[in-house]
Amino acid sequence: MFEAIRKARASSNQARLLKDLAGDCHRLLGAAGDSISLGLAGQALGRFERLDSERREEFYDLLAARYNPEPKAVIDAAKRYEAAGLPEDLVKLTEAAEAPRQELFRRLNRADRGTACLVRMRREILGNKKKRKQLAAVDHDLQHLLSSWFNPGFLQLEQIDWNSPASLLEKVIQHEAVHAIDGWADLRRRIETDRRLFAYFHPALPGEPLIFVEVALGPEMPRAIAPLLERQAAPDAQVRNYKVATFYSISNCQRGLKGVNLGNFLIKRVVEALRRELPQLQRFCTLSPVPSLASFLQSKEPIKPGVLTVEKSRRMEKQRELVAPRLAAAGPGPLPAALVKDLSTLCAVHLIKSATRGYPLADPVARFHLGNGARLKQINPNGDQSAKGRKESYGFMVNYAYEPGEIEANYERFAAGEVVAAQRVKALLP
């Protein structure tokens, strides 16, 4: 009985808290003075943070239902702009089309911890958006604003090393998403003298990395990940021969910033920083997974022609069918040479087949690097023998090369529908 009373009281308190939060938001949008607005924003955020998950979902539903643009005002403004095409009519149309919740988010952002709270809101909305379609517009508005607030011009690039705060190093271990860090000894190896780790930070989120990249320095472009992750001692200062900087892991730390483009600017700024520190570096590349390769090889869907003829596409579909039982029979460990040859061709088809407009590149890592102006440099069979690597890509990895003098041209070619690839990769195509 007492438990039922306790639950009823807690539910009543949460309902009252949500009602008060809704009132705060209404008053916040009508507040004229900055000092009043700031106080209301802090009060609203305090109430939001005390809501339980159920009431937070109700609050997000309220944002979706109550703070939309007025349809008639948008239509009337659009008609005026269509009729006259005047700049002032365009301004009025833009104002009418903007959802009032965007201004609400701007005012909430002014309060202490406002930015962190809005990032957390979006993380929770992303977790609910698939089953709660009404949140799509709320998510769009938040992403739009966060993209402006987290513009790379506002971000700080910092190198993380063994002298960084322990709390920050723990977050690197926690957020590493490509090659898991197995404790402090593993982390220490990744920031030795032949390694670099850079992260982006925002002034409103002190001590919270937004995204970080791990770099290995060495004499040549690597073909496999295992040697980069081994915990052998770093080379002596007298025998260093750094010619190549390899980006082997990029991890986003804030799910609430999904869709906010940070990675491409991070890589370009790290390239600049490394060139200043180590002018002898001759090449900047990645050693990247192909996380969509296994699903492509297991797919029954037709291969879109792209740069291939219909006849060659059909031939590749048949080859894909034939390698499936051979892959199953191969078992763990390195793939045999005959299977490597066929899979290399299929991997090249998978990564280059979208070299015409209308065929979006399926692999997210390839799309990221090629969209940043990299060149598909090399396909590496048996490059990742970890359980994750075998499951996602049968051990295949890829080198993407960032050549400072051709990044912009490569980006324009990719935007026009061409996958920029080295001749050795193109030679694998049927």
Image (cartoon, rainbow, N blue to C red):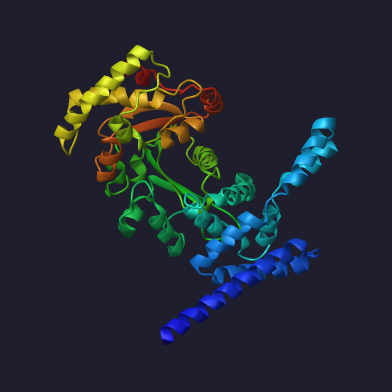
Q: Is residue 254 visible?
A: no
> Please, is residue 256 above or below residue 354 in the view?
below
Viewer-nearest residue: 337 or 17: 17
Viewer-nearest residue: 132 or 374: 132
Viewer-nearest residue: 411 or 224: 411
- Identify which residue is drawn at 48% across, 20% down: 356
Q: Is residue 30 visible?
A: yes
Q: Position of residue 311 (x, y in %)?
A: 34, 12
- Identify which residue is drawn at 33% across, 31% down: 296
Q: Position of residue 359 (x, y in %)?
A: 46, 25
Q: Position of residue 416 (x, y in %)?
A: 54, 22
Q: Quadrant of residue 366?
A: top left
Q: Is residue 331 left or right of residue 25?
A: left
Q: Position of residue 150 (x, y in %)?
A: 60, 49
Quadrant in the picture for the N terminus:
bottom left
Quadrant in the picture for the C terminus:
top left
> Please, is residue 168 above or below residue 9 in the view?
above
Q: Is residue 26 left or right of residue 239?
A: right
- Identify which residue is drawn at 36% across, 21% down: 425
- Identify which residue is drawn at 31% across, 17% down: 314
Count of marks overlaid on the render? 0
